[in-house]
Amino acid sequence: MLQLKPLSKDSIPKAVTRAKHYRLLNEPIQAESICRDILKVEPDHQLALLILILAITDQFGAEKRSSPAEAQELCSQLSSEYEQQYYHGIIEERLGKAALNRDTPRVKYIAYEHYQNAMRFYEEAEKIRPQGNEDAVLRWNACVRGIQEFKLQPAKDRGGVQPYLDV
């Protein structure tokens, strides 16, 4: 049976650079693989966790399996509460965007709920953001623009859509 080869601890900085590079090349599967190799050697490597979360969310809506639950679980491993809130927001926002690319019933309501969830996380992140960091504000504004552009609104029936049941 094939075995994965371990990464040397010394090669982690270069591997992180490669993972970032593959994300920028729109190759999230390769970036994900590299991050998993890094985390085998250094399980608490914060930058590898962030890149892995983003690589997973890059795949939302793609045919490859991507796990919102895994991305959310990885967020809980981030040491910064700000980053936990912020990246939970990223996950929700990207789930909303992925929902809009489907042609199933109620996608606009589902997308709206994801955007609203993202905005709640961004609000919490904004309250505890590092001085001068406006990333949560920028993401909040992007969600508002997405809701406006796609004319998203809450479901009028059933007390809202439960987006987690949609995935």
Image: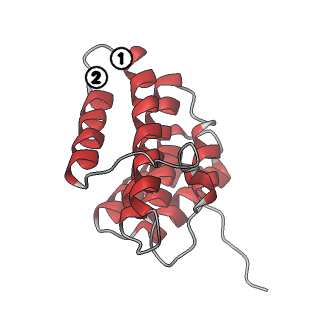
Neighbours of disc 2 within 10 Å: few (<14), some (14-19), many (20+): few
Q: Between 1 and 103, which is closer to the camera in this rendering?
A: 103
Q: Is residue 91 above or below residue 135?
A: below
Contact flag, marks 1 and 2 (Cβ < 8 Å): yes
Q: Which mark is residue 133?
A: 2
Query: What amino acid type should be assigned to the residue bearing mark 1?
Result: Pro
Position of 161 relative to 62 (above/below): above
The residue positioned 36% from the left and 17% from the top of the image is 130
Residue situated in front as seen by the camera: 147 or 13: 147
Q: Amino acid at mark 2?
A: Asn
Q: Position of residue 155 (x, y in %)?
A: 46, 49
Q: Which residue is mark 1?
A: 130
Q: Is residue 75 visible?
A: yes
Residue 112 as seen in the image, left or right of residue 143: right
Q: Residue at x 46, y 46 (%)?
A: 113
Q: Secondary structure at mark 1?
A: loop
14, 47: nearer the viewer = 47
Q: Tell me residue 19's x, y (percent).
A: 41, 59
Q: Nearer the viewer, residue 51 or 92?
A: 92
Quarter occupied by the N terminus: bottom right
Residue 118's x, y, as percent? 43, 39
The residue shown at (36%, 58%) is 97
Q: Is residue 2 left or right of residue 152?
A: right
Q: Quadrant of residue 23?
A: bottom left
* Callout 2 secondary element: loop
Percent of width and height locating residue 16: 43, 52
